[in-house]
Image (spheres, grey):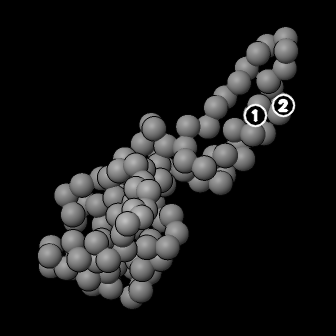
Amino acid sequence: MKTLPSLKAKHQDWHRADIKSALEKAGWTLAALGKSRGYQRGSLVNVLNTPYPKAERIIAEVLGTTPQTIWPSRYNQDGLPVSGRVRSCVTLFNSKFNTPENNYNVEFGGAN
């Protein structure tokens, strides 16, 4: 019998059903949680499909954990959110300042 290769646990995000289930066990739905924090109904659902650091913090707080635990692929090693903007800034910095004379080289520590 073939087995599927497993993902490394430290890089695997929680499944959307697990997040919803954990919220339900804590007495919340995404809609109710969003409404309680001043968001429009359905706003927090976006966090299940796309990075949304503010919503990630709200959900993690209610679950008694950190966003990095729930969505490790969305955060770099320093605990900062990974974003296209950060990647772009690092690339721009290296292209302008990393020359043979000064040998600057900033590496992006986030997930690709």
Q: Residue at x 15, y 73 (%)?
A: 26
Which residue is the extreme one toward the bottom? 41
Dot 2 amino acid type: Lys
Dot 1 amino acid type: Phe
Badge 1 marks a residue whose secondary structure is helix
Q: Residue at x 78, y 39 (%)?
A: 92
Image quadrant assignment for residue 35: bottom left
Mark 2 touches mark 1? (CB < 8 Å): yes
Left or right placement of residue 49 versus residue 92 in this view: left
Q: Determine if residue 112 is in view.
A: yes
Image quadrant assignment for residue 93: top right
Give the x, y percent position of residue 83.
59, 53
Which residue is the extreme one toward the front? 1
Query: Which residue is disc 1 drawn over?
Result: 93
Give the x, y percent position of residue 11.
42, 50
Badge 2 marks a residue whose secondary structure is helix
Q: Residues within 10 Å of mark 1 (few under 14, many from 20)?
A: some
As drawn, the label of residue 96 is 2
